[in-house]
Amino acid sequence: MALLVRNRTMLPSLVSDLLDTETLLPNVFDLDEDLLNFSGRSLMIPSANIIESEKDFRIELAAPGLERKDFKVEVDNGILTITGEKEEEEKEEKGNYRRREYSYNSFNRSFALPENSLPDKIEAKYDNGILHVMLPKREATISKTVKEIKVS
């Protein structure tokens, strides 16, 4: 996927350079923009913030437009996976005119859990377009050696 999202100055244009659109189709349209346009709603990868405190790790996933029921949070073999899916249908009927449009958006983000985490106690909350996942830490078990000091 990283090959498709490119910087025009660094990598050659995939379609325009192969077909020489400057010569064949000057200023008509940019084939790359039409074929490789990921800025729409077809591909949604939410940004994530990971915050560590003394007591826990927190993941904040920006996913506006979704609802609680659209999320699935799972832990399997030390990997936290957050999946989101939203399916929408839009209908319009006027006289002899009918329009139906469907859209389906999904994403999948995975995070390796640190060894000092408690995966059985993960909590998730969705609020104002942000999914908050709280992952408590285990208490550090530092063995304290007892040193006896003689009083003179």
Image (cartoon, rainbow, N blue to C red):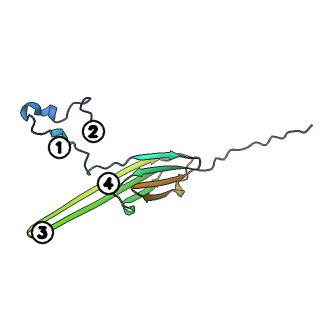
Q: Residue furthest right?
A: 152
Q: Is residue 20 left or right of residue 8?
A: left
Q: Residue at x 44, y 46 (%)?
A: 49
Name the amino acid type tagged 4. Answer: Ser
Q: Is residue 6 left or right of residue 97?
A: right
Q: Residues within 10 Å of mark 1 (few under 14, many from 20)?
A: few
Identify the residue under disc 4.
106
Mark carried by residue 34: 1
Q: Residue at x 43, y 58 (%)?
A: 127
Name the amino acid type tagged 1. Answer: Asp
Identify the residue under disc 2.
5
At mark 3, the secondary structure is: strand
Q: Is residue 26 above or below residue 101?
A: above
Does the CB distance between marks 1 and 3 fall below 8 Å?
no
- Taking depth in this image into account, of 61 and 15 the one nearest to the observer is 61
Identify the residue under disc 3.
94
Q: CA distance from mark 2 to mark 3?
A: 40 Å
At mark 4, the secondary structure is: strand
Does the CB distance between marks 2 and 4 fall below 8 Å?
no
Name the amino acid type tagged 3. Answer: Lys
Q: CA distance from mark 1 to mark 2?
A: 13 Å
Q: Quadrant of the C terminus?
A: top right
Does the CB distance between marks 3 and 4 fall below 8 Å?
no
Q: Earlier in the sequence, mark 1 or mark 2?
A: 2
Q: Earlier in the sequence, mark 1 or mark 4?
A: 1
Residue 78 shows in this picture: no
Q: CA distance from mark 1 to mark 3?
A: 31 Å
- Image coordinates for residue 111, horizontal then vertical, percent: 44, 47
